[in-house]
Amino acid sequence: MRSLWEATLQADGQIRTGFDVVVAALLGADEVALGTSALIALGCVMTRKCHLNSCPVGVATLRPELVKAFSGKPEHLANYLTMLAHDVRFHMATIGMRNFEDMIGRTDLLRVLEPATYRQKLLDFGNMFYRVKESASLTQTPATPADASYNVDHKFMETAIDVIEGKTKTTNIDMNVSNRNRTIGTRLSYHISKKFGEAGLPEDCKINIHLSGAAGQSFCAFLAKGVTCTLEGDANDYVGKGLSGGTVIIYPPKEAKFESQLLYTHRKKQSSSLI
């Protein structure tokens, strides 16, 4: 009953086909998340080595000799998502639905298959198929987009634009951040790649960013070559995700009472560094 809270319910896990998406919606999901199936479309063979840096098909590794084996293309993922959408439309049509919102929470359109084993007979799905009062909202109105002021990259661009446009060679940026500031550096990297491609900034151009505080998720994701981002503090998960030639340095505050641990990684091809 959405009258009790303002939240978007997202279903995740084992979402592979349009049928899975439709069932998730009928059970009350406002949206679904895809992970494994998208990776498989790009070539993942499920060897369970994501954490070992030894992915044989180059999906989850930074080793140059393995990255060469990556055969995925954007078109592969686009084709999968297109076919998934067609499959969703097909199953929606079979139950007489014209739009996704109309399906949400319609558990009356589901039925439980007859149990085939003794253990299956012990399962009770009664609560999952409980129908709420029609007066209660079954869908969540899309939330207002996140406050753009939390994205600090637009502030970076005020200074960095001169380097990108060739008006100056180097610029320095100092700023405080919090965990509300997510994907720091990503939009800046987009503008760099839009102008210079995957090569990043020219060799004689540098953008030096000095931050302090606790950065949010995906700090410096896809950071482009020529950008060095130094953070005094800490950052959440996905630091340096998809690092694309940039340098990321994180060290604890000076007042920290624990010893700093150094982790250094380097990618020769794109000269990426994570310290």
Image (spheres, grey):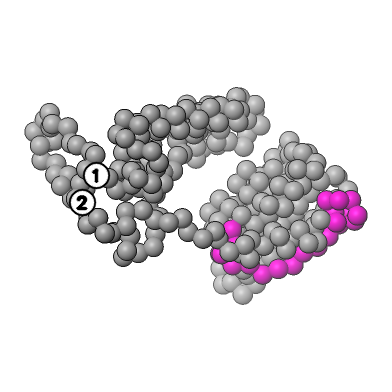
Q: Read off the residue under disc 2.
A: 131
Q: Does the stretch in magenta take in 92?
A: no
Q: Earlier in the sequence, mark 2 or mark 1?
A: 1
Is residue 70 visible to the viewer in this orientation of the structure?
no
Q: Secondary structure at mark 2?
A: loop
Magenta-colored span: 162-182
124 sits left or right of 24 in the view: left
Q: Amino acid at mark 2?
A: Arg
79 sits left or right of 118 in the view: right
Which residue sits at x=80%, y=61%? 159
Q: Nearer the viewer, residue 119 or 162?
A: 162
Q: Read off the residue under disc 1.
A: 107
Q: Residues within 10 Å of mark 1 (few under 14, many from 20)?
A: some
Q: Does the stretch in magenta take in 167?
A: yes
The vertical placement of 266 against 182, above or below, is above
Q: Amino acid at mark 1?
A: Thr
